[in-house]
Image (spheres, grey):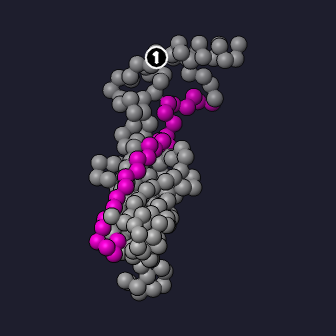
Amino acid sequence: MALTLSISAGYGSTNVAAGMQVTYVASVTNSGATAVTLNGLWVSRDSMSGNAGVGQPTWQTPGVSVGAGYPTLAAGSTYNYPFSVVFSAPNMAGGSPNSAPGGAAPPNNAAYPIDSGFSFTINSLSSDSTTASATYFVPVLSTVAPFPIPQGGALQMNSGFNLVNFLTSFA
């Protein structure tokens, strides 16, 4: 067992929203005593997660024929390979707080939008025939407002909560 994998958040990975391209970093650590060749490194979206476009890390040397551009990982070293993910859901918001005063769940609406969390797995294969994998979970925010926007900037007073909030905030 020479390789250990991990996934870390890269550029733009805080407050991930649907439709946004996010960069993650796959870290490959050779914890063995000898150098090994990285024969495969790929990312897959878990089947139970929602829709996401997962890019593959660039780990081979560009412009080299297949099989000749595999990197050799020195013993006791870590190499980082970035990859990108675009989350396409959730594309609808959860229930409106105005339709359920007091924090109760709105009627006939789910409390949270579907597909609001994603997980993906990175896998590797090395020249000594060992495999490794690591899984990463990402909560994704909806790009749709979670409640109706008041028309013309007006307050929505159909809920006592909004009136109390207005009076205590601005009065």
The residue at which mark 1 appears reads as 101
Q: Residues within 10 Å of mark 1 (few under 14, many from 20)?
A: some
The answer to whether 24 is drawn above or below residue 154 in the figure is below
Task: Return the x and y of residue 121 as percentages of the image width and height.
Answer: 36, 56
Q: Could you tell me if residue 43 is visible in this image? A: no
Task: Return the x and y of residue 163 as percentages of the image width and height.
Answer: 59, 14
* Residue 77 left/right relative to 1: right
Q: Which residues are magenta?
A: 126-152
Task: Return the x and y of residue 35 as percentages of the image width and height.
Answer: 42, 74
Viewer-proximal residue among 8 and 139: 8
The answer to whether 94 is drawn above or below residue 8 in the figure is above
* Residue 34 left/right relative to 47: right
Q: Residue at x 63, y 17 (%)?
A: 166
Q: Residue furthest front?
A: 33
Q: Could you tell me if residue 62 is visible in this image? A: yes
**Image quadrant occupied by the C terminus:** top right
Q: Residue at x 40, y 67 (%)?
A: 32
Task: Please check the rendered image and state whether residue 144 is part of the magenta-colored stretch, yes or no.
Answer: yes
Task: Return the x and y of residue 92 as percentages of the image width and height.
Answer: 42, 40
Q: Residue at x 56, y 21 (%)?
A: 156
Q: Residue furthest right?
A: 171
* Helix, strand or loop at mark 1: helix
The three-letter amino acid code for the residue at tag 1 is: Pro
The answer to whether 62 is drawn above or below residue 99 in the figure is below
